[in-house]
Amino acid sequence: MFIEKGYDQTTVSDIVKNIGVAQGTFYYYFNSKEDVLNEVIERYFRNFESMVDKICGDDELNAQQKLQMIIDLSFDFPKGKQKMVQFLHYEKNILIHQRYSSQINALIIPKVGQVLEQGISEGLFRTGYPRETTELLLVMFGYLHDSMSLLENTEEINRKLLAAKEIVEKVLGVKTGTFKLSVKCRDLI
């Protein structure tokens, strides 16, 4: 609903009408529409964090496999997530986007940093600055998310992904073709 009407234009009355509950029921669970938005975003983060934790905790995977899976997860856009990403990137939602970016960085930097440390100890990655490398890679991925939400030119998106893939491989000291970066946009079944 926030995506369709815009956050500012959506009222609590719109929300309760859309989901078919009384306003009193709404206010029993939420104090405002901002609480609803925060819950939607928090639910997304909890789900994302759970999947990243599962990947990072899998002792059967080496660091290269873990990093590839995290990259794949980051660029997998089920239809609902596509709309959320676009919503967060609307200019009028800049404060929401900044909070989102801060949360995702706080969540993911330590986990990806551990994966890079694992890759260094396994002899798969070669970087003297794993934490800083993690931060810079995530800034790049954040930029990709930002630009992809605004771009509709598939060729331009693919060029950015190829450039990002090359940067990841060079920064980690791995051979060309080690990683794959692609965007998956799909409907949920």
Image (cartoon, helix red, strand yellow):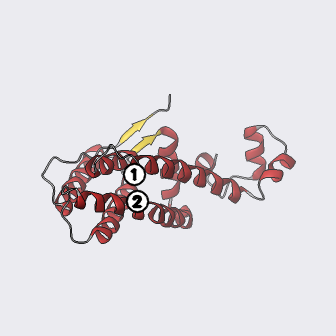
Depicted 147 relative to depicted 61: above or below? below
Front residue of this view, candidates 127 and 101:
127
- Kindly give the residue lying farthest to the left in the view shown: 175
Q: Earlier in the sequence, mark 2 or mark 1?
A: 1
Q: Amino acid at mark 1?
A: Cys
Q: Residues at badges 2 and 1 in contact (C-beta under 8 Å)?
A: yes
Instruction: Locate residue 47 relative to residue 124 in the image: left or right.
Output: right
Residue 164 point in image, percent of width and height = 24, 56
Can residue 23 be seen by looking at this rendering? yes
Crowd rating for badge 2 (residues with CA inside 10 Å; few <14, some 14–19, many 20+): many
Depicted 18 relative to depicted 106: above or below? above
Give residue 111's mark.
Answer: 2
Screen quadrant of the N terminus: top right
Instruction: Locate residue 95 relative to residue 146 in the image: left or right.
Output: right
Depicted 17 relative to depicted 49: above or below? above
Q: Residue at x 74, y 39 (%)?
A: 19
Instruction: Locate residue 181 relative to residue 178 in the image: left or right.
Output: right
Front residue of this view, candidates 128 and 76:
128
Which residue, given by chain and number where applicable, does mark 1 sit on? 56
- Kindly give the residue lying farthest to the right in the view shown: 24
Q: Residue at x 50, y 32 (%)?
A: 188
Can residue 152 be seen by looking at this rendering? no
Q: Residue 77: which quarter of the image? A: top left
Q: Residue at x 37, y 49 (%)?
A: 70
The residues bearing labels 2 and 1 have C-alpha atoms spaced at a distance of 7 Å
Mark 2 element type: helix
How many labels, in total? 2
